[in-house]
Amino acid sequence: MTDTLTTRPRFYFVDEAAAELRRSPASLRWMLHTGQIKSGKIGGRTVIAASEIERIISEAFAD
């Protein structure tokens, strides 16, 4: 059984994703608006997949 406190969520709300990427929520919303980050809607709220967060982090360290 996995510990839910140490596993990452499957998706993030905008404020959570901003905190994970250490950006302001406004900055993250701009990235969403300009298509730099892909998102979806669940229950009327914008969500970002954990894989999208990982992609952004990986690209930041790419040569």
Image (cartoon, rainbow, N blue to C red):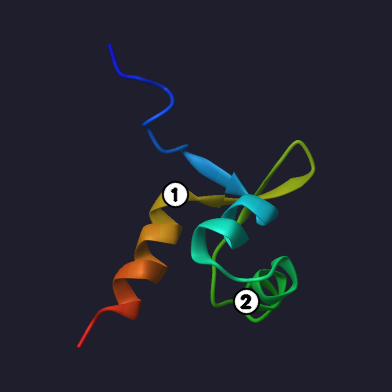
The answer to which quarter of the image holds residue 59 is bottom left
Circle 2: element type: helix
Residue 8: percent from the left, percent from the top? 41, 38
Q: Left of 31 or right of it: where is 50?
A: left
- Quarter assignment of residue 24: bottom right
Label 1 or label 2, whichever comes before in sequence order: 2
Q: In 3D space, how far apart are the residues under numbered discs 1 and 2 (Cα atoms)? A: 16 Å
Query: Could you tell whether 13 is left or right of 3 in the image?
Result: right
At x 53%, y 43%, the residue is 11
How would you rate the neighbour count of disc 2 (Cα within 10 Å): few for under 14, some for 14-19, many for 20 or more?
few
Examine the rendered structure and indicate whether residue 27 appears above or below residue 6. below
Identify residue for label 1. 50
Q: Residue furthest right?
A: 44
In which quadrant will I find the C terminus? bottom left
Where does label 2 land, which residue?
A: 31
| Quadrant assignment for the N terminus | top left
Give amino acid for label 1: Ala
Residue at 37% across, 31% down:
6
Residue appearing at x 51%, y 65% in the figure? 21
Q: Name the residue furthest left.
A: 63
Crowd class of label 1 (few under 14; some 14 to 19; many from 20; radius 10 Å): some
How far from the left and from the top, in percent, is residue 51? Answer: 39, 53
Percent from the top left, x then y, of residue 54?
A: 36, 59
Looking at the image, residue 45 lies above or below residue 14? above
Q: Nearer the viewer, residue 18 or 34?
A: 18
